[in-house]
Image (cartoon, rainbow, N blue to C red):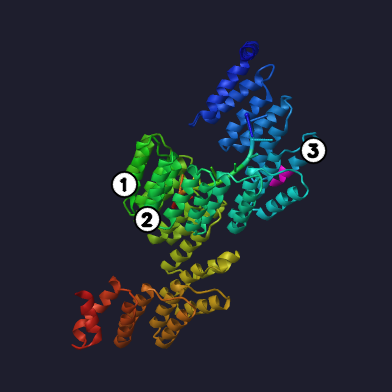
DNA sequence: GTAGGGTTAG
């Protein structure tokens, strides 16, 4: 029986040699990786389309899926259109691919329009159709509607949800921060017939980690394992990521060992999480060790790995090292992208090597890379930092002309840069022109302006801004209070200063090391030694130390103070 | 078992 079937198949293949030939090429494309993958798929598609009679729609959908997996959604849609033009009829599979592509291209509405056509064309929507639409709504940040659609499908018994559909809803809930609701839905699944799989658990585990509830995530992980659901790379990667984010690198490293013991192989992404965490935390050495570990396992570092290292070195100001890594990656044929270069541009700017930054900024554009908000923001910071506000302004105009919307970081840089270059009126004017509520109510921007105005010799404007902030009902933070303390001190308003210090504690905002340093320094400058003494003691009692600048003000006073003065004792204690 | 789901850089 088996034998006959096989012969039958072989006979069929010989009659239509293209079928098996195409199948082979599709399979090899599915497993392929590398830059030519999409092009090869397109080439194959053309061949298939020209073949008479055309291969089955089955093969076409498989091939287009390759393109979709490579995130070439517009291309996929064009191919589907070409098939239609060649008279190949669509089915629910091609329609679902089309809906998915439109959703990914931010056109959910079009996806729903296609849902209507499925009925008209006599293709009843499948579970996947609805899942795709739910996911589309989630992608468009319309989670509430996604949940409503899901509920409606259940209520009207349109379909019986499966793991994938539950997963999309759980994912949506997590995305908007409703992890608790997601957890409830997970529990609901556990109690029903459609049990959650590793994918659904992983989403919630990841979300718990992002909510800073890493220990809850670990508990859920244990519970999942108890239920016989095995963790996979993504589960472990999420946990490693969560642990790293909260400085628990040692546990993260242990998690890596655990996963390998369980027979789950870490991926490049898993290692990238570690590499990135080490870099951000300042230990590029450990990051390099992690890279070595991944290479030992036969994994190839990718653009993310190298970019993380470059960023790590740039953050430490070790630009030579960063440049070395860049050379290394180019030698390995890994193409740096805008994120890679942004780190370098930022590094140059921070090191005041503005010419190098400008050069690289030009060079990447010649290569065809498009600078983004981060590129422009770094450049702006560099130009203001090197005392060239005119060039900065020009670049800001260029950025807007290109239709790039500045983000809150850009505005911080702009306001700070202007103030630093004695342009506090310009900074204020820019701030007044802002229209977004989020920006107008950002305490950080106020802090910059208050500090800026005061440094530009306009303490009254600084005080007005502080009043304005409080009137708006915004909550000043430690930085706001600290800046204001320095403003009051500078103006000799010692009473106001003390009052604010008391008020901030009342508001649950404890002074930090910076607050005390600023206060003591200002008091010393004003020759208010007795007051300085009081706060110096208080800060030390609270576990803070005078910083370098405070010391500079402190040391010259030793000869002037009496032998048994407390200030002298404190200084001696600190220097011994 | 061709379509739909989870981690990942500045």
**Residue for point 44% across, 83% down:** A502
Residue A361, x across and y down, in percent: 43, 47
Identify residue for label 3: A119
Identify residue for label 1: A321
Of the numbered discs 1 and 3, the one sitting upstream in the chain is 3
Task: Identify the secondary structure beneath mark 1.
Answer: helix
Q: Identify the main secondary structure in magenta.
A: helix
Residue A15, x across and y down, in percent: 65, 11
Query: In the visual, does A208 lie left or right of A558?
Result: right
Task: Identify the secondary structure beneath mark 2.
Answer: loop
Query: Which residues, given as a range, are shown in magenta?
Result: A108-112
Query: In the visual, does A6 lie left or right of A318?
Result: right
**Residue for point 33% across, 74% down:** A544
On what subunit does the disc labeled 1 rest? A
Q: Is residue A48 above or below residue A80?
A: above
Q: Nearer the viewer, residue A195 or A498?
A: A195
Q: Quadrant of the N terminus of chain A?
A: top right
Identify residue for label 2: A281
Q: Are marks 3 and 2 on the same chain?
A: yes
Q: Is residue A379 visible?
A: no
- The magenta stretch spans residue A408: no
Of the numbered discs 1 and 2, the one sitting upstream in the chain is 2
Task: Identify the secondary structure beneath mark 3.
Answer: helix
- Circle 2 Cα neighbour tier, 10 Å, few/some/many (<14 / 14–19 / ≥20): some
Of the numbered discs 3 and 2, the one sitting upstream in the chain is 3
Residue A298, x across and y down, in percent: 38, 34
Query: In the visual, does A120 lie left or right of A480?
Result: right
Tag 3 near tag 2, CB within 8 Å: no
- Circle 1 Cα neighbour tier, 10 Å, few/some/many (<14 / 14–19 / ≥20): some
């Amino acid at each position: 029986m088996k034998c006959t079937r096989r012969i039958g198949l072989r006979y069929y293949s010989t009659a239509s040699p293209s079928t098996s030939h195409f199948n082979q090429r599709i399979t090899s494309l599915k497993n392929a990786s590398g830059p030519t993958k999409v092009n090869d798929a397109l080439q194959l598609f053309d061949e298939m389309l020209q073949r008479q009679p055309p291969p089955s729609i089955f093969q076409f959908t498989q091939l287009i899926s390759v393109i979709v997996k490579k995130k070439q959604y517009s291309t996929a849609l064009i191919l589907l259109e070409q098939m239609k033009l060649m008279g190949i009829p669509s089915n629910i599979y091609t329609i679902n691919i089309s809906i998915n592509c439109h959703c990914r291209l931010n056109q959910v509405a079009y996806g729903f329009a296609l849902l209507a056509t499925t009925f008209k064309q006599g293709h009843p929507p499948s579970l996947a159709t609805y899942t795709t639409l739910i996911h589309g709504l989630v992608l468009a940040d319309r989670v509430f509607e996604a949940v409503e659609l899901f509920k409606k499908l259940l209520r009207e018994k349109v379909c019986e949800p499966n793991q994938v559909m539950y997963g999309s809803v759980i994912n949506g809930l997590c995305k908007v921060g409703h992890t608790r609701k997601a957890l409830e839905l997970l529990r609901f699944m556990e109690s029903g017939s459609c049990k959650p799989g590793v994918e659904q658990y992983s989403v919630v585990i990841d979300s718990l980690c992002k909510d800073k509830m890493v220990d809850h995530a670990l508990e859920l992980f244990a519970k999942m394992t108890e239920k016989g659901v095995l963790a996979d790379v993504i589960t472990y990667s999420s946990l490693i990521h969560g642990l790293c984010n909260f400085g628990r690198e040692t546990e993260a490293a242990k998690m890596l060992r655990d996963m390998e013991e369980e027979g789950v192989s870490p991926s490049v992404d898993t290692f990238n999480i570690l590499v990135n965490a080490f870099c951000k935390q300042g230990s590029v050495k450990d990051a390099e060790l992690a890279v070595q570990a991944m290479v030992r396992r036969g994994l190839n570092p990718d653009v993310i790995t190298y970019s993380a290292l470059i960023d790590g070195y740039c953050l430490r100001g070790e630009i030579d090292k960063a440049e070395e890594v860049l050379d290394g990656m180019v030698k390995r044929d890994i193409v740096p992208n805008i994120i890679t270069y942004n780190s370098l541009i930022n590094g140059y700017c921070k090191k005041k090597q503005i010419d190098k930054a400008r050069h690289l900024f030009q060079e990447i554009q010649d290569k065809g890379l498009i600078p983004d908000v981060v590129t422009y923001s770094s450049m702006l910071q560099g130009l203001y930092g090197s005392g060239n506000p005119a060039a900065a302004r020009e670049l800001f105009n260029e950025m807007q002309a290109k239709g790039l919307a500045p983000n809150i970081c850009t505005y911080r840089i702009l306001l700070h840069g202007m103030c630093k270059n004695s342009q506090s009126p310009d900074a204020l004017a820019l701030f007044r022109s802002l229209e977004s509520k989020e920006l107008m109510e950002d305490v950080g921007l106020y802090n910059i302006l208050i500090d800026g105005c005061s440094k530009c010799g306009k303490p009254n404007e600084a005080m007005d801004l502080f009043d304005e902030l409080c009137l708006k009902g915004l909550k000043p933070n430690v930085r706001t209070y600290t800046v204001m303390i320095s403003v009051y001190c500078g103006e000799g308003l010692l009473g106001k200063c003390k009052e604010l210090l008391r008020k901030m504690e009342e508001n649950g905002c404890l002074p930090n090391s910076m607050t005390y340093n600023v206060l003591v320094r200002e008091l010393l400058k004003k020759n208010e030694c007795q007051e300085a003494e009081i706060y110096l003691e208080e800060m030390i009692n609270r576990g803070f130390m005078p910083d370098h600048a405070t010391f500079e003000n402190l040391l010259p006073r030793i000869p002037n103070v009496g032998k048994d003065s407390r200030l002298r004792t404190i200084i001696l204690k600190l220097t011994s």
